[in-house]
Structures are given as C-alpha cells and as structure tokens.
Image (tube, helix red, strand yellow):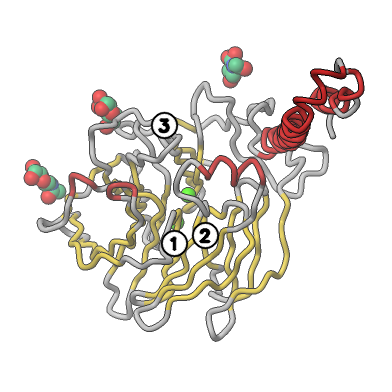
Amino acid sequence: MTGGLGTTWDGAGASPQRLPSACARASLPKTMGKLVALTLLGAGLALIGERLMTLRERTNAYREVEPVEPQNCHLIEGLENGSEDIDILPSGLAFISSGLKYPGMPNFARDEPGQIFLMDLNEQNPRVQALNISDGFDKASFNPHGISTFIDKDQIVYLYVVNHPHMESTVEIFKFEEQQRFLVHLKTIKHELLISVNDIVVLGAEQFYATRDHYFTNFLVLLEMVMDLHWTYILFYSPREVKVVAKGFSSPNGITISPDKKYIYVADVLDKNIHVMKKHDNWDLTQLKVLRIRNALSEKPRISTEYANNGSMLQGSSVASVYQGKLLIGTVFHKALYCVL
Ligand SMILES: *[C@@H]1O[C@H](CO)[C@@H](O)[C@H](O)[C@H]1NC(C)=O
Ligand SMILES: *[C@@H]1O[C@H](CO)[C@@H](O)[C@H](O)[C@H]1NC(C)=O
Ligand SMILES: *[C@@H]1O[C@H](CO)[C@@H](O)[C@H](O)[C@H]1NC(C)=O
Ligand SMILES: [Ca+2]
Ligand SMILES: [Ca+2]
C-alpha cells in the first residue's frame, strides 16, 4: 500500500493487546469489528489514493503545456459556447456541434439549446452560420454531441447527430438542404444499448458505429474513472441488428473510418491511445494496433503537434479537423480556432 495511508492501519492491528484488560474483554468484539472496518477503510482509501494519482496522470490534469501556436490562427467569431465535434464534407463545408451540456463539464450557456453551425472552408475568410432546423423537432432540448455525415448515391447529404435531450442519448438524422442552409429532421433513433453515446460514424443509411464514453450514468461514474474499469464498448447499430462489436475500453470518444472504409479509429481519452481496428463483414471490430500518443513533444516525435495551448486561448479541446491546409479545432464548452497551416 502507498505511503501515509498505509501506516495508519498497519499500527491498528497490534493495538488490542495494549487495551486495559477489563475494558478490552467487554468491548473486544466491537473493537475488532471497528478495527476490521478501519483496516478495510484504510486499504480502500490507499487504493483510491493510488488510483487518483493514476487518474491525475491519465487525465493530464497537471501537465505543463509547451505552446505550439502557428502564426495563422484566430478564434472563430460566433462560436464561444462549445464546438465538441466537427465533420467536414468533401466539398469543404464543415458542420460544427455547439452548446453541449454534459454532467461535470462547464457550460456558459446553460439556458440556451444547442445548435449546429456551418462553415464554408472554401471562403477566404470563413464565417459560421447557425443552421435552422425544421419544425416538429424539439429544438428547446437539443443537446448535440458527436456528429457524422453521410452522402448517399443520389448525393443527398445526411447529418447524424448524437443528442442528449434531458441527458438521455439519441441519434437524430437530418437531411441537409444545402441551398437553403437548412436541416430537415427525419428520424430519432433510440435503443437500450445507446447509452452515454459520445460519437458516431455513419456507414450507410441508418447504419453506424457508436462509442459509449462511460458505463455508469450516475455518480458511480466517478468510481468507474478512479478504478479504471474498462467496461465500455463500441456499438453497431442498424435497423435489423444492434450489437456490441468491441469492448473493454476505458472511455472511447471520437470515432472515424479510414478513407478506404476498412478500418475504424477510436480515440480513448483516458487511456491516451488511438485504437486502430479492422472492420469485418459481420461488422465486428478487432484490434489491429494501438497508437500511444506519448512524448509527442520529445526529440523524435512520431506524431506532430500542430497546436498546443495552456488554456489562455482555448480550453478543453475535443476535436480537430483538416481540409486543404485549413485546421479547425473545437472545444467541449469553450471557443473554437481556425488555422491556416
Ligand atoms: C454564449 O452564451 C452566453 C450565455 O448565454 C451568451 O451571452 C453568448 O451570446 C453566447 N455566445 C455565442 C457566440 O453564442
Ligand atoms: C432561420 O430562421 C430564422 C427565424 O425563423 C430566420 O429569421 C432566418 O432567416 C432563417 N435562416 C435561414 C438561413 O433560413
Ligand atoms: C499560458 O500561456 C500564455 C502565452 O501563451 C502565457 O502568457 C501565460 O502566462 C500562460 N499561463 C499559464 C498559467 O501558464
Ligand atoms: Ca464525429
Ligand atoms: Ca467527442
């Protein structure tokens, strides 16, 4: 057991002998019970202490950030209340989900519903524009999280959005009307396995993989993080079949597909790695390799750091997306950045 906590309960084991005998006889069972309880408490605390230290390391809570700030970066006007996920179409139109309300995360616009913004990266000075949503969809409880686009064979663009109305998890399907810059709500998908969904990647009409970022949805989530339970999974959803296709993750977050559609990449934020998984014909996923993002700032970095900031400019970044040398960086609850690389 670790340090200070260990000494508290090591000493306790020897003490019954030293108790005054009369008093000891009467209260020995009680004392023993207390000692056992104390021992267990001590052991528990020591374990939690050790786990908290690990968690502190895993979450980078006290990491010193060496700034990496390209010259051509500026904050995006009109995006101040989050931009948790960004998806860019091959045409250069970027969708940005904004206004996520999530337990344990700050939110600067508590009373305002979330929104989807559009940004045309082909423009010289791209600006964001909030997309209007068709009537009949409950906009007041819109709480958008991960997003993914899908273009069908008729070139119709669909935007799939992880939504947390009243802290539940649903997936909303919208049709994007490019001319009118408008989202037509088509369908809400709910399923008992779609819990704590963070992000999705659409594979076909109403077919997607979804990441579940926590196992518990109540206060036990703290225990889950502290004990590093690895109880979460990736789900495959289709109208005919819904199943867990990979499990044993700590906190899977962003998910995306390789350009050749053969591999799936999943970022596990607490494990600090990116899983590269092979997609099988039956939709199951198997682990191919795991890319550890460690020492990215060392002398021989295998992964380049395009941007790093200590919070003075951006806080809680959650996504980065590139289109023809233009980089967008989004955050869970804060501002967003546009860079020309
Ligand atoms: C962010 O939220 C705050 C608080 O509701 C609001 O005053 C502000 O206008 C919002 N900013 C943007 C860019 O939507
Ligand atoms: C979106 O809706 C608002 C209010 O209904 C309207 O003023 C605005 O023109 C609409 N914008 C677009 C692009 O349709
Ligand atoms: C963060 O970085 C900025 C410059 O990038 C610097 O001015 C500021 O002092 C730093 N803050 C902390 C808390 O390190
Ligand atoms: Ca996404
Ligand atoms: Ca995410």
Q: Secondary structure at mark 3?
A: loop
The reply to whether the C-beta atoms of the residues labelled 2 and 1 are less than 8 Å apart is yes
State if disc 3 and disc 2 touch (CB < 8 Å).
no
For the question of whether residue 135 can be seen, the reply is: yes
Name the foreground residue: 34 vs 249.
34
Q: Quadrant of the C terminus?
A: top right
For numbered disc 1, what is the local secondary structure? strand
Of the image marks 2 and 3, the number of the one nearer the N terminus: 2
Report whether residue 57 is seen: no
Q: Is residue 49 above or below residue 277?
A: above
Where residue 240 appears, as percent x and y from the top left, is: 37, 83
Horizontal relation, residue 83 to residue 178: left or right: right
Q: Which residue is mark 3?
A: 334
Residue at the spot 87% in from the left edge and 19% down from the top edge: 21
- Residue 237: image quadrant is bottom left
Instruction: Report if the beta carbon of the residue with label 1 is closer than 8 angstroms to ligand 4.
Output: yes
Q: Read off the residue under disc 2.
A: 255
Which label's residue is closer to the chain start, 2 or 1? 1
x, y (%) of residue 161?
Answer: 33, 57
The residue that disc 1 covers is 200
Mark 1 Cα shell of 10 Å, populated few (<14), some (14-19), many (≥20): many
- Separation (CA) of disc 2 from disc 3: 21 Å
State if disc 1 and disc 3 touch (CB < 8 Å). Answer: no
CA gap, disc 3 to disc 1? 22 Å
Picture quarter with ligand 3: top right
Q: Residues within 10 Å of mark 3 (few under 14, many from 20)?
A: many
Could you tell me the amino acid type at mark 1? Ile
Q: Is residue 312 left or right of residue 297?
A: left
